[in-house]
Amino acid sequence: MSSNADLARRRDAAVTPAAASVHPFYPARAEGARVWDADGKRYLDLSVGIAVMNVGHSHPKVIEAVRAQAATFQHLCFAVGMHESYVALAERLNALAPGRSPKKTFFANSGAEAVENAVKIARVATGRQGIVAFSHAFHGRTHMTLSLTAKPNPYKAGFAPRAAEVYRADYPYAYRHPLAELGGDFGERMVDRLRDQVRTTIGENEVAAFVLEPVAGEGGFIPAPESFLRGLRDYASEIGALWIDDEIQSGIGRTGSWWAVDRYGLEPDLVTSAKALSSGFPLSAVIGTAEVMDRIGPGMLGSTFGGNPVSIAAALATLDVIEEEGLLERAHVIGERFAGALRELGREHAEIGDVRGAGAMVGVEFVKDAAKTPAPDVVSEVVAHAREAGLILLPTGTHGNVIRLLPPLTLTDAELDEATEMLAAAVRHAVGATAVGA
Ligand SMILES: Cc1ncc(COP(=O)(O)O)c(C=O)c1O
């Protein structure tokens, strides 16, 4: 068995440096909330493959479903002949999707592909081209989706020309936003700003769709306020545009409901899902109102691997596990415990500028001073110290100064206690003992 050091050497020789990793370890085995690396070191995992293993690593039900499907048939391609499980998962997702309108679903392989397909559907369905994406957005790395993504480095820089007819509006990120300081309802103010940005830069008749993460993930775990989402829904309908709700990171129970927008009873026109949908087997979905999905013609969407039977089996088992083990409720408990512990720490340490999130999607933003200058160096230190202690964390945020917690929703109480202690120790180590106001 190779060690971390052996693997690092082989990797340098064989793998492009463009495929980077946050952590310098090489996972060898994983189960539940635990990961073991090539040197045999054990970790508690609060990253779960970037919001993928919501039901924990190697859940026996998922493994069994995958094994059974692989032994029956691996692949025939939906474009050649229909397999029943594709339809069964579509039925299931249509029933779970936000809102009451009848729904239809299309399957692809990755999150980026789901967003690409949602854009294609929106353009055909509306006969318009303009796509409005937001600051702090991440929608993927394919040509269209890197154009929708906001952050230049490392996602967009060098990849010009980017896709045409993509426009940028402001994400409702209240922390350090001047409009938040004016008082009143920040979400409503940001909808007014959006209307103004659309009218003065694109024109309302040219907008095919707004693409928005209800909780900005790579942007820094920023939940959009309810009033903003509500206002966006109304505005899109008013001008004949669609709302594409990117739930690739926030969906499948992560926020304590199937979709982040469920918390407000809102119905987008199209929802994109991937990541936790199939517990690590490549699969993504575009779920849309039947009214919109029926406007695109036969054969206009497709993919050799999209909706492959093994990934679909993993997805059906994943949805069962979430229901049977009450993981939506558990996401609330886990999220509140972490957010509470971090707020407590924030009273001791001025470097903790903001603690926010939804359900078990918790972000903590670190700053250097009262002017809220981002402190990515503190985040790097917290992440490194936690890793040494055996806790896997991930940084995030446009400025790299946010730690995102993505615990498995199966985390036990004992693991929660252990993770909270390790997290607090790593924060204390990184920020020193500077008390607020000292
Ligand atoms: C909100 C969101 N959209 C899209 C994507 C792209 O997904 P994938 O990496 O599977 O292409 C991601 C991935 O992090 C994401 O978080």
Image (tube, rainbow, N blue to C red):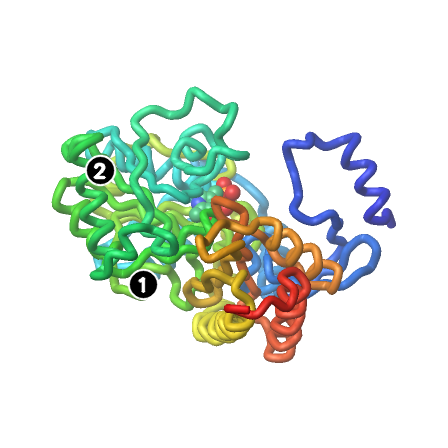
| Precedes in sequence: disc 2 or disc 1 | 2
**Which residue is denoted by mark 1 in the rendering?**
262
Q: How crowded is the residue under tag 1: few (<14 C-alpha within 10 Å), some, or many (20+)?
A: some
Tell me residue 216's x, y (percent): 41, 51
> Which residue appears at 66% of the width and 55% of the height?
381
Q: Is residue 80 above or below residue 98?
A: above
Q: Is residue 71 above or below residue 411?
A: above
> Which residue appears at 58% of the width and 59% of the height?
65
Ligand 1 is within 8 Å of the C-beta of the residue at disc 2: no
**Which residue is denoted by mark 2 in the rendering?**
197
Q: Hey, which quadrant is residue 92 in on the image?
A: bottom left
From where the camera sits, is residue 82 visible? no
From where the camera sits, is residue 44 visible? yes
Tell me residue 324's x, y (percent): 48, 74
Tell me residue 431's x, y (percent): 62, 62
Horizontal placement of 247 versus 69: left or right? left
Q: Mark 1: which secondary structure? A: helix
Please, which residue is most extreme toward the bottom here? 413
> Which residue appears at 37% of the width and 45% of the height?
286
Q: Amino acid at mark 2?
A: Gln
Q: Mark 2: which secondary structure? A: helix
Q: How crowded is the residue under tag 2: few (<14 C-alpha within 10 Å), some, or many (20+)?
A: some
